[in-house]
Amino acid sequence: MDVLVVDHPLAQARLTAMRDARTDSAAFRAALHELTTMLVYEAARTLAVEHFPIQTPVAPTQGTRLADPPLLVPVLRAGLGMADAALALLPESSMGFVGLARDEHTFEPRAYMESLPVDLAGHPVFVLDPMLATGGSLEHCCRLLADRGCTEIIVLCVLAAPAGIERLDRSGLPLRLVTASIDEGLNEKAFIVPGLGDAGDRQFGGMPRF
Ligand SMILES: O=P(O)(O)OC[C@H]1O[C@H](OP(=O)(O)OP(=O)(O)O)[C@H](O)[C@@H]1O
Ligand SMILES: O=c1cc[nH]c(=O)[nH]1
Ligand SMILES: [Mg+2]
């Protein structure tokens, strides 16, 4: 599986703000928004483009645009904080939604929402979720997309644990990963270490489990 680590100093500064336990929710959301802009910029580098004629004030020339803007799929809740920034850079994109909550004991994802186009054959998809921990949630989400015929899945996350990367790699799904960091590992609660805590709670506050 192709993995790109965006180690640009401006990206790492936003990541540092997100890791810092003193960062409040508003500053956390702002840093995630800005970091997502950088992740999307890098992830979009390999998208297919098409050229078309335009006229500058001086002369005719060729313009460039994305041939097929990717479907954006934030994984609720935490991925919601990446949605606005991605849509700002990709204003022609459509958006689908997948809602997953990881069970605190089994660490398996429980699906509670799915709103996706029926047929994704031939279309690229950007999956937005800040955290790749055990990989259960993102594997579940990417499988939903592959089941709809998608063969070009790009996962954008803030932090990836080695176990999650290995799981996605083993899944055989047609994906590549863009992340701001590969962290050391997981603790006994399957939280990423050193990580940044619970990305959903840090943006939106704690939630009672269903
Ligand atoms: O790789 P995994 O082990 O599956 O863990 C990662 C998942 O955990 C977090 O979501 P969470 O279940 O906490 O839901 P939330 O976004 O509503 O907080 C995160 O946003 C990922 O979706
Ligand atoms: O460290 C982790 C692991 C899963 N989900 C999170 O939000 N954080
Ligand atoms: Mg959470």
Image (tube, rainbow, N blue to C red):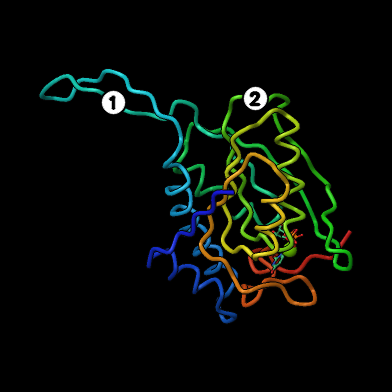
Residue 29, position in %: x, y?
Answer: 55, 63
Residue 41, position in %: x, y?
Answer: 42, 48
Q: Secondary structure at mark 1?
A: strand
The kind of residue on which mark 1 rests is Gly
Q: Is residue 195 above or below residue 63?
A: below
Q: Residue 63 shows which numbered tag?
A: 1
Q: Secondary structure at mark 2?
A: loop
What crowding class fits label 1: few (fewer than 14 Cα within 10 Å), some (14-19), or many (20 or more)? few
Number of disc labels: 2
Ligand 2, seen in the image, is in the quarter at bottom right
Mark closer to the chain start, 1 or 2: 1
In front here: 96 or 206? 96
Q: On the image, numbered disc 2 is attached to which residue?
A: 121
Left or right? Give the position of 205 relative to 34. Answer: right
Q: Is residue 187 above or below residue 38?
A: below
Quarter holding the C terminus?
bottom right
